[in-house]
Image (cartoon, helix red, strand yellow):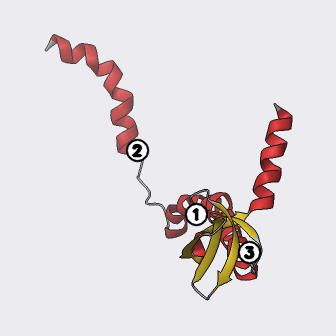
Amino acid sequence: MKRSLILLPFLAPVVAMAQTATPQQPGMLEALFPFVIMFVILYFVLLRPQMRKQKEHQSFVTSIKRGDEIITQTGILGRIEGLTEQFVTLEIADGVRIKMLRSQVAGSAQSVIQAAQKDSTKK
């Protein structure tokens, strides 16, 4: 009995607030607003740059031609010797040719070499 008398002054405001406050349910727009904001942030931070990069890669892959020096996704440097719609024949050394998917071309070898030279001059 003595314990309940000690806690009673601390519980009185809580009980009074519970009795007087009527809980309000948030509206449909108020409930969805945080999710809309998160989606907009994700779109501009992740999705949009990824789509732009994918579009640039696709245009590069369609514009390659015989004789271009490229680098593959696995890091192999070579010169294009043959092209089809799906495949690229790449010469990686004298007389050594490999056939690979066209989508596995990462980029131009010149851009990779220039980026490596910039990194070495920074250090």
The image position of residue 112, as x and y in percent, is 75, 55
Residue 60 tag number: 3
At 59% across and 62% down in the image, what residue appears? Answer: 73
Residue 109 tag number: none
Q: Is residue 1 above or below residue 24?
A: above
Figure quadrant of residue 40: bottom right
Query: Badge 1 is on which residue?
Result: 39
Which one is earlier in the sequence, the residue at label 1 or at label 2? 2
Please, what secondary structure does the residue beneath circle 2 have? helix
At 81% across and 37% down in the image, what residue appears? Answer: 120
The image position of residue 98, as x and y in percent, is 56, 71
Q: Can you say which quadrant of the picture contains the C terminus?
A: top right
Left or right: where 43 falls relative to 117:
left
Please, what secondary structure does the residue beneath circle 3 have? helix
In the image shown, does 101 or 97 lie closer to the viewer? 97
Amino acid type, residue under disc 3 in the picture: Phe
Query: Badge 2 is on which residue?
Result: 20
The image position of residue 66, as x and y in percent, is 74, 80
Which one is earlier in the sequence, the residue at label 1 or at label 3? 1
Which mark is in front, 1 or 2? Answer: 1
In the image shown, does 34 or 56 lie closer to the viewer? 56
Please, what secondary structure does the residue beneath circle 1 have? helix
Amino acid type, residue under disc 1 in the picture: Phe
At 80% across and 60% down in the image, what residue appears? Answer: 110
Q: CA distance from mark 1 to mark 3?
A: 30 Å
The image position of residue 23, as x and y in percent, is 41, 53
Which mark is in front, 1 or 3? Answer: 3
